[in-house]
């Protein structure tokens, strides 16, 4: 069928893909549960035996996601430096590990949402149950982090307001720049991020001078064997976001994600594969990339374009 749009048939997903999804979710549930349980204990251990001022700055940065700045803020305000830096470093690794697990779960949620009707009903019910159980684990973690937030915010009143503002500003910049910071260039502004063929969204010639961004195929390049890499639909993303996208990387989850998209494309459901990317993006980044997905779906992957391939 090539890439012609399928408007009559139903998507058919092999049973093996449903089994892979279920197995990956079951494995992730065990990993996530173990990390969150230990994480809650570690957070409690920091607050109970140690004076709160020892680790306040470092913990605040960690809660905000600033793993680089955590050590720096600890150095600036901690009277008992060695103890605090050791503990904040431990939490930094924990926050990173849990964020990665949450991203894996979000990618699998996106897959499930778009193939649920194609799965065996019994398999679909088991997958729903696993996702619900993991959502409960995440809620436990979020509650623990919220408790950290509430406790720390009280420490940044009055004379510490400037420290709070500086920490928040540093975190905002670090989170936006991501890997672009390594290139010593600011990221491409959201309203200037391009959409179209990969050839028109990759490389420095397609970015404002002195900026950085990465070109993200949607659907995944590997899922479109009949379309050359340069002709594949793509849009510019911040590099840190690109690394978190469901199609990126060599994990088992990313491989399954791309395999599902390949199955969709082979059956004429490429627009639905792009919509799966939108779901994945929304779970991780909110509506940030909606304009790019709108442009990709409305102006690039048109029926006429699909017929070209």
Image (cartoon, grey):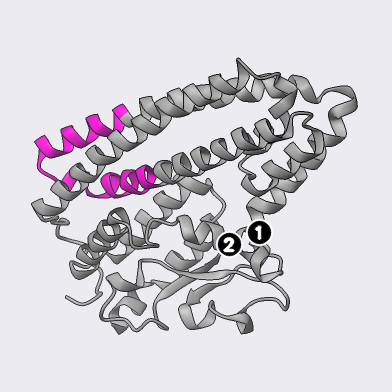
Which residue matches tag 1? 177
Residue at x 70% of width, y 47% of height: 172
Magenta span contains residue 124: yes
Count of number-bearing discs: 2
Magenta residue check for 195: no
- Quadrant for residue 274, please give it: bottom left
At horizontal 52% and vertical 63% (from top left) the residue drawn is 292
Q: Give the Cα separation between the discs numbered 2 and 1.
A: 7 Å
Task: Tell me the mark number nearer the camera, choosing from 2 and 1.
Answer: 1
Among the 4 quarters of the image, the one containing residue 72:
top right
N-terminal of the two: label 2 or label 1?
1
Region of the chain picked out in magenta, as a range: 104-133
| Viewport quadrant of the C terminus | bottom left
Name the chief secondary structure element in magenta.
helix
| Vertical order, 159 against 214 (above or below) | above
Mark 2 residue element: loop
Q: Residue under circle 2?
A: 238
**SS of the residue under disc 1:** helix
Above or below 159: residue 261: below
**Extreme-right residue of the structure:** 159
Percent coordinates x, y for residue 117 in the rendering? 18, 44
**Is 27 placed above or below 307 here?**
above
- Which residue is depicted at the point 42% across and 65% down? 297
In front: 235, or 175?
175
Q: Pointer 2 and pointer 1: residues touching (CB < 8 Å)?
A: yes
């Amino acid at each position: 069928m090539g890439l012609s749009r399928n408007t009559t048939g139903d998507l058919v997903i092999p049973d093996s893909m449903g089994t892979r999804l279920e197995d990956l979710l079951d494995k992730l549930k065990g990993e996530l549960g173990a990390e969150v349980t230990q994480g809650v204990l570690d957070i409690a251990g920091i607050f109970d035996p140690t004076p709160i001022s020892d680790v306040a700055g470092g913990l605040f940065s960690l809660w905000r996601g600033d793993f680089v700045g955590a050590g720096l803020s600890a150095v600036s305000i901690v009277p008992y430096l060695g103890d605090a830096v050791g503990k904040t470093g431990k939490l930094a690794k924990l926050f990173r590990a849990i964020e990665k697990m949450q991203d894996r779960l979000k990618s699998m949620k996106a897959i499930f949402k778009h193939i649920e009707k194609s799965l065996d009903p019994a398999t679909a019910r088991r997958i729903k149950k696993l996702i619900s159980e993991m959502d409960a684990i995440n809620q436990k973690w979020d509650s623990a982090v919220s408790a950290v937030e509430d406790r720390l915010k009280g420490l940044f009143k009055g004379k510490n307001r400037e420290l709070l503002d500086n920490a928040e500003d540093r975190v905002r910049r670090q989170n936006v720049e991501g890997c672009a910071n390594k290139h010593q260039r600011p990221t491409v502004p959201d309203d200037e991020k391009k959409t179209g063929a990969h050839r028109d969204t990759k490389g420095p010639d397609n970015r404002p001078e002195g900026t950085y961004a990465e070109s993200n195929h949607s659907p995944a390049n590997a899922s479109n064997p009949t379309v050359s890499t340069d002709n594949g639909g793509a849009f510019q993303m911040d590099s840190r976001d690109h690394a978190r996208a469901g199609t990126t990387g060599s994990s088992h989850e990313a491989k399954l994600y791309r395999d599902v998209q390949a199955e969709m494309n082979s059956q004429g459901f490429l627009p639905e594969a792009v919509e799966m990317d939108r779901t994945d993006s929304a779970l991780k980044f909110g509506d940030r990339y909606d304009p790019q997905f709108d442009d990709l779906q409305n102006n690039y992957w048109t029926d006429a374009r699909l017929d070209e391939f």
